[in-house]
Amino acid sequence: MPRYVVGNWKMHTLRDEAVSLAEGVARGIRDLDPAEVVVGVAPPFPFLEAVGRAIAGSAVLLVAQDLHPEAQGAFTGAVSGPMLASLGVERVLVGHSERRSLFGEDDACVAAKLRGALAAGLDPILCVGERLAEREAGRQEAVVAAQLDAAFADLDPAARARLLVAYEPVWAIGTGVTATPEQAGAMHAFIRSHLGPAAPPILYGGSVKPKNASDLAATPGIDGFLVGGASLDADSFLAIVEGCRAAPRSE
Ligand code: PEP
């Protein structure tokens, strides 16, 4: 099974910056075997098409940051799965903690988006993770289990096989505080046992940087990374990709 490293550019870059960042990533992974590491970039919506052109012919996957659950309709400002698919998007983030906390997305909304993505032929990256107060109260497993249960309810095996899960403890996102390999490894093991033998690959996200990528990637159960801040610089993103590729596999 390959590892995965996906860069979430959030609401950063202007058009030309997005294109040159994408070109830098595509150039940097020219010799990388996608059977070892699958690399994706998630630019802002307006730049998906230009970034898609910049990575055409490379192994870089085009990923979107969000979608609306419905295929079309009177939803001013929203972007649907079929629209994304028509631009060549292959995967989409669903349930990122910034969507949950800043845009009021609850588990039902996340589940609806997941189904909208699958129906449009997009493979979802489901983001889950606890807040600091929940971890301090020892509730991190209960919180993540509830997020997983809401999203996975009624998904058939074929749909499950299309998912990636990203464990992103909210207290580690954009804060510079990374979960230790032990904390991340423990949660990944919990998620895997909760989802059972057909559990999808599980990525870690939360202040992944070139300096901590190798240790995290070598941790049993961590199948790759969702990277925010460090994905905005091609060199640091590519260093994370290389840290992930070179880390010993624990299985
Ligand atoms: C993210 O946005 O998914 C993320 C993990 O951000 P950062 O790497 O900046 O913590």
Image (cartoon, grey):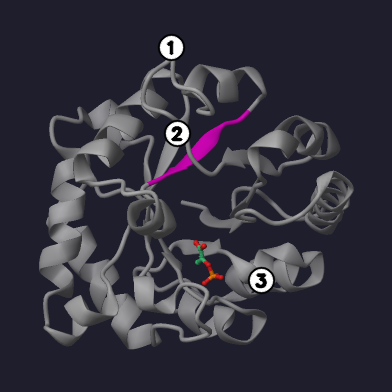
Magenta-span inclusion, residue 92: yes
- Asked whether mark 2 and ligand 1 are closer than 8 Å, the reply comes as no
- Mark 2 touches mark 1? (CB < 8 Å): no
Q: Amino acid at mark 1?
A: Gly
Residue matched to label 3: 230
Magenta segment boundaries in residue numbering: 89-94
Circle 3: residue type:
Ala
Give the residue displayed 25% in from the left and 72% down from the top.
187
Gap in Å between the C-alphas at discs 3 and 2? Answer: 23 Å
Q: Residue at x 37, y 19 (%)?
A: 70
Q: CA distance from mark 2 to mark 1?
A: 22 Å
Q: Nearer the viewer, mark 2 or mark 1?
A: 1
Asked if ligand 1 lies within 8 A of label 1, the reply is no
Q: Within 8 Å: ligand 1 and the Cβ of disc 3?
A: yes
Give left or right: position of 185 versus 84: left
Q: Residue at x 20, y 51 (%)?
A: 148
Image coordinates of residue 96 in percent, x first then y, are: 41, 53
Name the N-terminal-most of marks 1 and 3. Answer: 1
Label located before the other in sequence (3 or 2): 2
> Which of labels 3 and 2 is toward the front?
3
Q: Are marks 3 and 2 in contact (CB under 8 Å)?
A: no
Q: Which residue is mark 2?
A: 123
Examine the rendered structure and indicate whether residue 79 appears above or below residue 73. below
Q: Is residue 196 visible?
A: no
Closer to the chain start, of discs 2 and 1, is: 1
Is 106 located above or below residue 28 in the figure?
above
Is 74 situated left or right of 133 in this image?
right
